[in-house]
Image: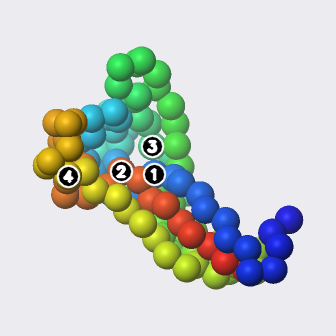
Amino acid sequence: VLRKDGIIIFVTASMEASKGEWVSLSYSFPENDRPLRSGETVKLLIRGIDVVLYDYYWTDDDYTRAAERAGLMLAKIHKPLGSRDDSIEWRDETKMSPLAIYVLRN
């Protein structure tokens, strides 16, 4: 239940996630080496703990349409970038984000 004028925030992989080289994630699997269509699965590795997961690829438009069907409006999409001034030696995180943060309103 979301009260009137409420906001919901959710975080997921960005559309660009499978295209980058990330500090904490790897999408470097042969089965990901194809143009992705919405709803397809992608394989990823969480670096450092060597856990392999499967995720779904969805576009920003897919998320926006799903929000609208639920009676919500997209207020903002954040795709945070790493800074060269950070103490982390980023890979592609300074050019594109592996994350998409959707802010939705009712």
Work out whether residue 7 or residue 28 is closer to the camera in this orientation and state it: 7
Q: Is residue 15 visible?
A: no
Query: Residue 80 falls in which quadrant of the image?
Result: bottom left
Question: Where is residue 21 shown, x and y percent of the image?
Answer: 23, 41
- Residue identifier under label 1: 13
Element at label 1: strand
- Residue identifier under label 4: 83
Mark in the foreground, 3 or 2: 2
Element at label 2: loop
Question: Where is residue 89 shown, x and y percent of the image?
Answer: 16, 36
Amino acid residing under circle 4: Ser
Mark sitting on residue 98: 2
Mark in the foreground, 4 or 1: 4
Amino acid residing under circle 2: Pro
Q: Earlier in the sequence, mark 2 or mark 4?
A: 4
Pointer 2 with pointer 4, Cβ within 8 A? no
Q: CA distance from mark 4 to mark 3?
A: 27 Å
- Residue identifier under label 3: 42
Q: Quadrant of the C terminus?
A: bottom right
Q: Residue at x 83, y 73 (%)?
A: 3
Q: Quadrant of the N terminus?
A: bottom right
Q: Earlier in the sequence, mark 4 or mark 3?
A: 3
Pointer 1 with pointer 2, Cβ within 8 A? yes
Question: Where is residue 65 shown, x and y percent of the image?
Answer: 62, 77
Amino acid residing under circle 3: Val
Mark in the foreground, 2 or 4: 4
Say left or right for 18 vs 104. left
Q: CA distance from mark 3 to mark 2?
A: 13 Å
Element at label 4: loop
